[in-house]
């Protein structure tokens, strides 16, 4: 049994200097845009500085002291990632620039080699554009059929339709573990089992789930899992693609260049082993090292505790927000079925106006289509207001959000 | 955490942006609708925020005889378009294009250029302090400009109209 501990939020908040700032004189920041990017604790910022100050060198190249140190630090984070996601082999962790790059790597490295016309690729209606567009581009190049598991009105996937859609021609299933627009938690293990029964390869976009709940790639039954450092306290420009070793070994490289080769002659080249085969060029070394500090920070808290805190905050937010006049909340009804994301609409007030007024109260939320236009189309709204939470958010901050929404109503003279 | 309810907002700045006259145009837009076979029309959108407008114009002897708009989007985009339709109604082509230039200058500088007569639209001056919203305010005006450019490109438009009429 996993022991759940209540987080010491005041202590956590002290680690995030940015949370102490005001957005205008006397208006403290209330940061509720964590699904877009999280903030960074001093531990991560210090690690970035320490790397550049004390160890900076290129990796995998030099025999000199700094290069050896930099290589050890960089490779050390690969092991931290392995442990964090319970992967069987450290070589299965590939560093990329982010989830988008990770998914494109699968599309180019695996898809181009193993997909052909007549095959089917199944994704879902609730995907982020980064898990739609690469497959559309590949479909146009190869000519396979791209199918979408539809979204039900409560923001969950239509599992009956999924059972129909995933069939003998399905060669690849790529789904998000959590909707970035609505927070819906997707039953990935169940979908994965359906796809596996047809012999399909399973890709999971874990950009929204990895920062907020335990991730066990073996329990998911997936073949590839993608996520980004910047949504989980780490630096921007760093992401992970985890893949099963035999698939990674069978794949072609995505980009050619330095550090990904075994030998190069004027006629041809041979590839380095996994994972270097997929890490052409000088990677974001400092960023990866900083990501290591972020993983240490989250691991020390415990991902079960992260999830428990966000569940508590989300329940509170759903309850309080439901009482705001004119509010429509999108997504699953029960907090257990969603991550720390609440997407909503205020009757008669455009989300951008809501976002603008909230900003004047210090409240940072996202107003827009959240790079998930098919979700907006299904809900028949042009955009929504999205508040998304993390380990440092408090009930007090939800109260500020609620009161700022009520003020927005008053200002626009609508429902109040 | 000492937040108890919302702090005082940055009031004057918000008041500058959401002037009463702007909210009035948003709640009760003027010249909303469409024209069945307009002299010219255009669609405009801000893909990033999803604001959309359609502007249709009827010209008689180079004068805006009638103008209608439809669309959806934030208060700034819709109110700005509504104010624009009131302002340009009855103007000739040259004056309309001058008004468009003056409004663009207002968005750039936060104050109307000398000798400009933008009427209610001058209430949008506060938008200039919010760079992310300037494109919302400009949307209707740019769409009108595009519609007029089409009219100027006379043969194409005329041909289309003749075909429609026939």
Image (cartoon, coloured by chain):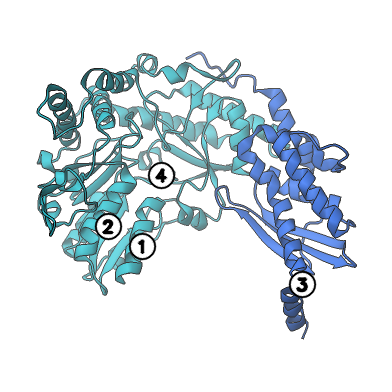
Chain colours: A cyan, B blue
Q: Mark 4 points at which residue?
A: A180
Asked whether the residues under the numbered discs 1 and 2 touch, taking CB atoms below 8 Å apart as contact, a structural biologist would say yes
Reply above or below: A311 against A179.
Answer: above
Sequence-first tag of 1 and 4: 1
x and y, in percent, of residue A398 in the image? 50, 27
The CA span between labels 1 and 2 is 9 Å
The front one of A325 and B111 is B111
Instruction: Tell me, yes or no, whether dots 3 and 4 are on the same chain.
Output: no
Figure quadrant of the C terminus of chain B? bottom right
Asked whether the residues under the numbered discs 1 and 4 touch, taking CB atoms below 8 Å apart as contact, a structural biologist would say no
- Tag in front: 1 or 3: 3
Q: Name the residue under label 2.
A: A107
Q: Which chain carries label 1?
A: A
Q: Mark 3 points at which residue?
A: B154
Residue A74 relative to residue B164: left or right? left
Quadrant location of residue A411?
A: top right
The CA span between labels 3 and 2 is 48 Å
């Amino acid at each position: 049994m996993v022991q759940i501990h209540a987080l010491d939020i005041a202590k956590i908040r002290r680690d995030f200097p940015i949370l102490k700032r005001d957005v205008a004189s006397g208006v403290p920041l209330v940061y509720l845009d964590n699904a877009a990017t999280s903030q960074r604790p001093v531990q991560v910022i210090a690690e970035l500085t320490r790397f550049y100050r004390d160890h900076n060198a290129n990796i995998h190249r030099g025999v000199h002291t700094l290069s050896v140190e930099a290589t050890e630090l960089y490779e050390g984070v690969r092991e931290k990632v392995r442990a964090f996601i319970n992967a069987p082999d450290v070589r299965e962790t590939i560093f990329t620039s982010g989830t988008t790059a990770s998914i494109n790597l699968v599309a180019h490295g695996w898809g181009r080699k193993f997909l052909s016309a007549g095959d089917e690729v199944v994704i879902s209606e609730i995907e982020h554009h980064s898990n739609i567009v690469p497959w559309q581009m590949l479909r146009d190049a190869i000519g396979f059929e791209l199918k979408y598991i539809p979204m039900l009105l409560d923001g969950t996937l239509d599992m009956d339709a999924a059972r129909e859609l995933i069939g003998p021609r399905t060669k690849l299933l790529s789904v998000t573990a959590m909707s970035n627009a609505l927070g819906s938690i997707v039953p990935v293990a169940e979908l994965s089992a359906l796809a596996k029964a047809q012999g399909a390869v399973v890709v999971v976009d874990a950009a929204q789930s990895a920062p907020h709940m335990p991730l066990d790639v073996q329990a998911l039954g997936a073949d590839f899992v993608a996520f980004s450092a910047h949504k989980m306290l780490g630096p921007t420009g760093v992401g992970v693609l985890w893949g099963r070793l035999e698939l990674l070994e069978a794949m072609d490289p995505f980009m050619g260049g330095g550090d990904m080769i075994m030998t190069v002659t004027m006629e041809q080249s041979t590839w380095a082993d996994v994972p270097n085969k997929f890490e052409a060029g000088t990677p974001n070394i400092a960023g990866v090292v900083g990501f290591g500090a972020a993983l240490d920070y989250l691991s020390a808290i415990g991902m079960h505790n992260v999830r428990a805190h966000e569940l508590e905050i989300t329940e509170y937010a759903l309850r309080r927000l439901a009482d705001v006049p004119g509010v429509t909340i999108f997504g699953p009804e029960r907090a257990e079925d969603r991550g720390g994301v609440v997407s909503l609409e205020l009757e008669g007030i455009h989300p951008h106006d809501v976002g603008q007024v909230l900003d004047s109260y210090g409240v940072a939320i996202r107003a827009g289509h959240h790079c998930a236009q098919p979700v907006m189309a299904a809900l028949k709204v042009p955009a929504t207001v999205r508040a998304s939470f993390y380990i440092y958010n408090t009930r007090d901050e939800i109260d500020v959000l609620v009161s700022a929404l009520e003020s927005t109503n008053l200002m626009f003279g609508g429902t109040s | 955490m000492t937040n108890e309810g919302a702090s005082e907002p940055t009031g004057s700045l918000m008041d500058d942006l959401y002037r009463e006259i702007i909210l009035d145009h948003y709640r009760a837009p003027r010249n909303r609708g469409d024209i069945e076979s307009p002299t010219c029309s255009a669609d405009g959108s801000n893909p990033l925020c999803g604001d959309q407008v359609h502007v249709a114009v009827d010209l008689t002897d180079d004068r805006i005889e009638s103008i209608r708009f439809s669309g959806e989007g934030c208060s700034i985009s819709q109110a700005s378009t509504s104010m624009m339709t009131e302002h340009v109604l009855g103007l000739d082509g040259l004056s309309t294009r001058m008004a468009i230039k003056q409004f663009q200058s207002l968005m750039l500088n936060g104050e109307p250029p000398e000798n400009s007569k933008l009427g209610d639209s001058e209430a949008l001056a506060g938008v200039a302090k919010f760079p992310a919203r300037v494109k919302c305010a400009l949307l209707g005006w740019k769409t009108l400009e595009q519609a007029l450019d089409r009219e100027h490109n006379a043969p194409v438009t005329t041909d289309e109209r003749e075909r429609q009429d026939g």
